[in-house]
Amino acid sequence: MVFLQVLTLPILFWNGPAGTSPLLEQAGITKIAVPPANAAAWKKTVHLAVEARDLKDAVKLQMPGIFFQADQASASRVPWIVSNGSRLIRNPNGMFYYDAPGKAAALAAAEASAYGNPASIQTDESGLQPIAEMLRFLASIPSAEGPALADIGFVDDGSPGAAEVMNLMVRDNLLFKIVGGREPDLKLTVQIGSEQYPKKELKDPNILVHKIRGDLTDDGRTIRIYGTSIVVARLTGKPGRIRLHLLNYGAATGTRVGGFRVRMLGQYSKYEVHSFNSPGKQLVDYEVESDATEFTVPELKAYAVIDFLR
Amino acid sequence: MPGPYKGQVVRVHSDASIDASTAIVNRAVVKQMLSNGMRSLTGDSNDHDCWARFISPQDVVGIKVNCSGSPHIMSSPELVAAIVENLTAIGLPSKNIWIYERFAGQMRSVGYDRYVPNDVHIWAAEQARDSILGYDPDTYVEVDFFGEEDTRSFMIRPVANTFTKIINVPKMKEHQAAGVTGCLKNIAYGDFSNMDRSHRFAKTNTYSFIGTLASVDPIPDKTVLNIMDGLSGVWHAGPFSEYPQFRFYPKQIMVGTDPVAMDRMLIDIIEAKRKAENVVSIFDRSPEHIGSDNNNPNVNRFFREPGHVEYASKLGLGVYDASQIKLKVVEL
């Protein structure tokens, strides 16, 4: 039996008047959230499920995506990823919204879904089709229970410095969860202000995150990605049955990722791919090693969910 | 590598090989230069015997070209066509020949397909940048230079799995990071993914990385010939060729099996040209000469690492000591 994931799906938040409903219907939108003041008018529309939602207490997230820092005199082509992952991890029950025009609307919906948050996505007319397609895709993914998997326990002191460290860890695919103190099942505990990670190291969060990566060791990382610098991974589930979320942050600007390699600790012999706008795509060069599973994702347009079984 | 002719380099020069004013290559002359070079290297009296020393009709041959300076400076299609003609002449089916590079866009701008039989494969590892599908997932070098997240460089898939022999056809160029880009760099950086990560700001790790990559099996065993295209070249701001004033015309090719010895000769050629232009040596490491103005031949983005050639000799890839290199010069 397939249980559809409905509770944590993001939703299109539409500010327009009820007279714009044909636009939404043509795009394939079936459910929206609207400001309470517009709700009565919208609820008269026939084809749309309408929910009143007040964003005045919601926190605005950044528009997800990438940008190249052309003013940096570096040969590196690695772009800057704008991810909201750390904010969604930091406040998992928070009320968030995005203002994401065009293709970014689809990526915003995917990001919110990957982190299990039913965020509101505001977009413009050009974003209706992309978000409609993404919402249909998200609704088609079978639900899978399980907490986020992590290698690192991070003691969050609530400071902006800690926020930036978490942001960089998300972007670098260093899997962490927020903890109150040391947890025995985690490989590393990071507490800013401790002897191992003194506060002065917050002066350069990038170097601090490199130190964290070194302390964890690359061999100890549950997930590694090779061949792209714009894909962020998230793992949920439990040992033996896990779900890998892959977000292509270039999708907001139409950048398809053509093929990249994933190394995941643990042996997983079976998998099922759910890939947005790439139906039928299978993993290639799939190899189960003594301590890890490696495979190549041949294409990632915006978002994929891959379920693995031991 | 370094193959049966360790420490030997044949240089064939012809004034008629290319028109420096138009960059038009004389195909017949280049074919003759290749013939003379191969005969001089091997001592054989006919082309068939020369090529049969290295290639058999059962082989699958990859011809590693260099297109990073295209459409102006690249492994000349006339030279590549002459190589293909010699391979088919010894009985190698043209479908067993692959002309390959990393990036499809650069290759397309050259148009090798117009010079070789239809069933020769013209193949690039990356149709679009940032895809590793053209690389072998099981053959890679893993190293962290600057804390970069992507620490693997994968070998081109057919290099690892399909080719039985490789003919390396680099271009005669200065390189902003490596100092020169000749045989070693073309077969090293040109055969792996994720290479630009080895340079950042003014620092480059080409000193050791080029030789390390060139030593990864099966590259040393499969690379049986190096034919360096010096009909035209680049003496500054390489490996690209955005500035016409930095192109030059040595009007020569070099032939050998020892990539280190050939690159040692290349260093001399680039240094001589730069000296003639009254600009700093590729061995210069003055911080005041580091900058982003590629238009100034005394300014470079990186501390160049031409020492990578000598380093490669220490890995057993060939002879670096000029006094131990036997250079044959053929004038056509």
Image (tube, helix red, strand yellow):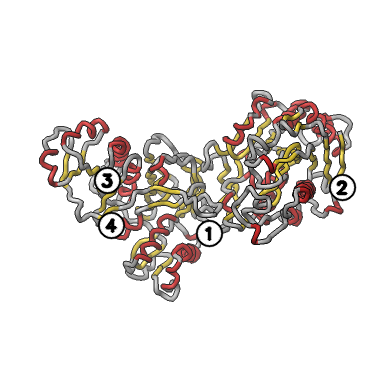
* Crowd around label 1: few <14 · some 14–19 · many ≥20 (10 Å): some
Distance between mark 4 and mark 1 Cα atoms: 30 Å
Mark 4 or 1: the one toward you = 1
In-front residue for pair A226/B29: B29
Chain ID at mark 4 = A
Q: Are marks 3 and 4 on the same chain?
A: yes
The residue identified by callout 1 is B147
Q: Which mark is residue A121?
A: 3
Mark 3 or 4: the one toward you = 3
Distance between mark 2 and mark 4 Cα atoms: 71 Å
Q: Earlier in the sequence, mark 3 or mark 4?
A: 4
The residue identified by callout 2 is B326
Rendering coords of residue B315 (x, y %): 73, 55
Residue plotted at (36% across, 61% down): A177
* Residue B117 picture quarter: top right
In-front residue for pair A12/A76: A76
